[in-house]
Amino acid sequence: MKHFDAIIIGSGQAGTPLAKKLALAGKKTAIIEKRFVGGTCINDGCTPTKTMIASARVAHKARTAALLGVETGEVKVDLRKIKNRKDQIVESFRSSSQKGLEAAEGVELIFGEARFSGNKELTVATSNGQEEVLTADWIFINTGASTTIPELKGLKDIDYLTSTTILDLEQIPEHLIVIGGNYIGLELGQMFHRFGSKVTILEKSSRITGREDEDVSAEMTKILRDEGLKILTDISIGEMEKVNGKISVSLESGDKKEKILASHLLIAVGRTAQTASLNLAAAGVDTDEKGHIVVNEKLETNVKGIYALGDVKGGPAFTHIAYNDYIIVYGNLIENADYSTTGRPVPYCMFTDPQMARIGISESEAKEKGFDFIVAKIPMSSVARGIETGETLGFMKAVVDRKSKKILGACILSSEGGEIMSVLQMAMEGGITYDRIQEYVFAHPTYSESLNNLFMKIKD
């Protein structure tokens, strides 16, 4: 049995920096990883998908270059080369992260799968076939989440894809069905459509991106449909089966029933916390009805000294939130800070093209909360930079408090939407009111300069 000051289960975007910083603070630290160092972000999420999305955007730009007076001829996509480039970048990021842990004095990197065998005790089935029993004063669970597989008739008999396995395809699907009309499904659906696939997106709700305002959802739907994706909403999925090498999916919408055939099927209905193998009951750690580990505003579980970080605890499932979780627990435990998750900003960006970026509350949330607010909105077709670059799809939208003039939230559906949103996030953090932004001097011609015009839509 080995004893550590701290053990971290999972080497994602919270676990890896936490391990190194705890060791620097003099804590004897172990970090346990069952698969690859780097977690979902580096291996299956942000890094590989955004790398491949960049290739898809280039293909789309080449096909539409004639609109800007540039003739390209036939555009050919080599998915094998795109995959190889992605693999090289992932391996670079992963190996850099692993080398950083291995070089950190005071950190022991253990490859294996951990399960609780007592209150502060873990049994690790290591990659070399041995078992180790480890104990610690602090334990941090950073095991992330994996693709949720829905209960659908016949699905188990279909060679379906997940957001992980689809990234290893080397041949472009003839027809890809995507089950799920939110961030993962839309990003990957648009990407493969730009590679050359016919794409059909199935969403059981009345609209895609259901957590956004209705005008955002409607605009995104129009953009994707105009590009050529088929989007079906209010869909109930019946039986699936293999038919002559194809995948047959039975659909029902109201009184209408149909079957569609496709070559490939992607499951993108959500993510499930990876807690099943942890044997949390042995430690007495509570989970909610969805399997997420329950934590307080300091990220501590109901068991003193055991913490949960990142996607495994539920809430916003974003890399930057996981990283901030590390900031919170390290600051509180080592620097005697009083950090909390209460009230922290939750910016996010969906990397469709155009991007859809959000910070703060939406218009619908402002109504629900009873705010006295004003909405400012301009189409990207009125933004000089957008016109000049041919990037006129989408709009900028902000919600402001009528009395204080503070920005409550914003949604930017545009090219480089994430960058524009970040400017507004900084304004919100600094308490900069919309009337000051109306007269700001921004560099011309930038996208951010049009924040002048956005807020000029508000008349005192």
Image (cartoon, rainbow, N blue to C red):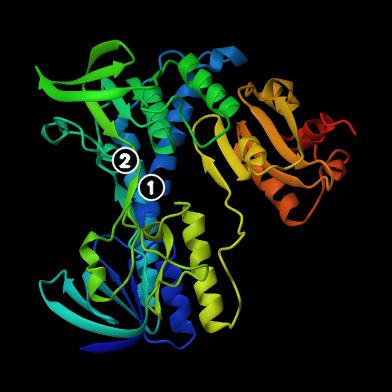
- Left or right position of 420 against 91: right
Q: Measuring 26% from the left and 18% from the top, which residue is drawn there?
A: 251
Residue placed most toward the observer, 415 or 59: 415
* x, y percent for residue 418: 60, 41
* x, y percent for residue 403: 84, 45
Residue placed most toward the observer, 261 or 408: 408
Name the residue that disc number 1 marks: 45
Q: In which image quadrant can residue 167 be found?
A: top left
Q: In which image quadrant can residue 241 be found?
A: top left
* x, y percent for residue 179: 31, 30
Q: Measuring 54% from the left and 42% from the top, which residue is drawn there?
A: 349
Q: Work out whether 171 lies above or below 271.
A: above
Q: In which image quadrant can residue 237 be found?
A: top left
Residue placed most toward the observer, 157 or 204: 204
Name the residue that disc number 2 marks: 163
Q: Work out whether 158 lies above or below 294.
A: above
